[in-house]
Image (tube, grey):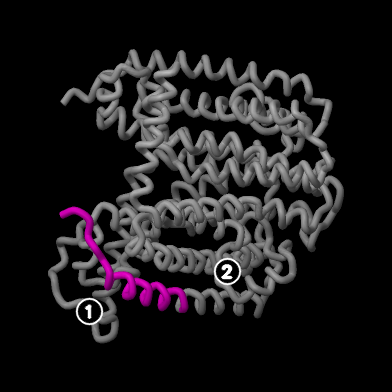
Amino acid sequence: MGAGTYPLQPRPSLVGTSLARVARVYAEFVRVGFVNTLAYRLRYYTGIVTYFIYVSVYYFIWKAIYADSASIQGFDFGQMLTYISVGWIIRSFYFNNIDQDIAYAVMEGKLAMDLIKPVNPQFMYIAQALGESLFRLGMLTVPTAVVLLLVYPIRKPASALHFTGFFASVLLSFFIVAAINFAVGTFAIRLQSILGLLRAKYFLLELFSGLLIPISFFPRIFVDIFAVLPFEYISYVPVLIYLGKLSGWGIARALTLQVFWILVLFALGDAMWRWSSRKITIQGG
Amino acid sequence: MKRHLRLFLLYFAQYAKVRMAYKADFFIAVISSMTATVLGFGFVLVLFSKIPRLQDWSFYEVLFLYGFSLVPLGFFNVISWNLYEFGDVYIIQGRFDRILLRPVHTLFQILFEKFRLESLQEVLTGTVVIAVCVQRLRLAWHGADYLWFALMVACGAVIYVSVFLILTAVSFWFEDRVGIVPPVFNMLTFGRYPLTIYNVFIQFMLSWIIPFAFASFYPTTHFLRRESFESLFHLVPVVAASFFVLALIVWERGVRNYSSTGS
């Protein structure tokens, strides 16, 4: 992983270290994540097909539904199709497998390597995932967007300003997902195998983030509960900005709340890592 | 036949023992697996809280279709574990040598060496959902319906096994660097909704190229008493048998083509 190149020294606290040095260290992890993904670049061709299939299923479902009505919950067919498509397109960027990576590191006994590195493990995993996501942006997100735009009548963003807000929001989505996955991943340290748990989390995020269906379609009680949880800030909120259903202060408020959730989840992940790493048993040796 | 049945039970018992070594772990796997399945219904439940029907399909009819798609798939998931890693573990690492040395059919060993036990919950969840729908839709099942149901579940599982066996057998010739299985696996999603909502191209593909419609949609139309697909419903066993034979032929050719890693 290239980690051996760093001189071992006491774990730097973020305060009191030169910020440029810290940035350099994590930039290296971003690079490693990017390069590691390079080996699997062929897989992205089928990834595009997979995303195309997902969007197509929902395209036909909504097409059948809108045959009877012009507008449902304030969405016309064009908006709904755009909602679904943009949702899947950004998903191809923001998702990551930090939780799985931790699970495998535990199973293969590689977690020891993470512990001896003089870095914050949460930021290390997130930096690597960012490298992967940047790679995917070019290899998966953009091609998928092009294919979908060619096949389906997807609407343009509401305005240049909305698109800028949307772009910033998607970047923040990445950090929300990354922080959630890190926190979930720490369970791997205490449990024997968490792959089943991860599958449940996968379906939970798909549904509660608004990727499958806009949050406003949920029964009222769920809408109220989701408002105080971070999940809808992953997909629902960025796509609403794209569609122009959030504007001006609404966008500013949404971005602020995304940052708020990132900070809360970072703190949670850090606490969970501390709690879990007190109990680490390294497999094999 | 009797020997194979005995072997199957021994394989099963052996693997169950392995999993039961970590009881809490297995328990968590079952609960998480069930949570994932139930969340999968979320889209349909939320959708129908805002719309009355999907084309001319009511909520419980769509729910029936979704539930039915889970039952054969659950059985398939239980035995398909080895297919996912076949290329990596058996071909590239050369573990297939071991399979060839034993006096039992290769396919038998590959399918029954490992079981994803927790996927049995999908069979259970699907069946419960179907039972609720049968009651709500007042379908009044008779003895014959239960027999058809069992047959259709078996045929559906055979169709899934056959399709993915053919794809798996490709690794006897090529190292699959592109990953052709995931897109096909994701096409299973198409089978969870009425076939009639899709365009002609997708309908044709799901019927005659990758016949997932014969594993979920056509059986469901029979149980929902939708007469227009009755002739295709009767074709289900034929399609299942044909694809299974095709899969066996491809597999046998693949086995003959196998040359070990040579180290």
Residue A90, x across and y down, in percent? 54, 56
Badge 1 sits on which subunit? A
- Eyeballing the image, is A117 above or below B124? below
The prevailing secondary structure element of the residues shown in magenta is: helix
- Write the start and end of the magenta stretch as one range: A264-285
Q: Quadrant of residue B95?
A: top left
Residue at left offset 29%, top offset 53%: A107
Quadrant assignment for the N terminus of chain A: bottom left
Q: Is any part of residue B263 visible from this angle?
A: yes
Q: Is any part of residue A160 visible from this angle?
A: no
Quadrant assignment for the C terminus of chain A: bottom left
Badge 2 sits on which subunit? A
**Residue type indicated by callout 1:** Pro
Residue at left offset 36%, top offset 65%: A186
Residue at left offset 40%, top offset 65%: A182
Q: CA distance from mark 1 to mark 2?
A: 32 Å
> Mark on residue A233?
2
Q: Mark 2 and mark 1 in contact (Cβ < 8 Å)? A: no
Between disc 1 and disc 2, whose residue precedes? Answer: 1
- Circle 2 packing at 10 Å, graded few (<14), some (14-19), many (20+), is many
Residue placed furthest toward the bottom: A16
Could you confirm whether marks 1 and 2 are on the same chain?
yes
User: Which residue is labeled 1 in the image?
Assistant: A12
> Mark on residue B229?
none
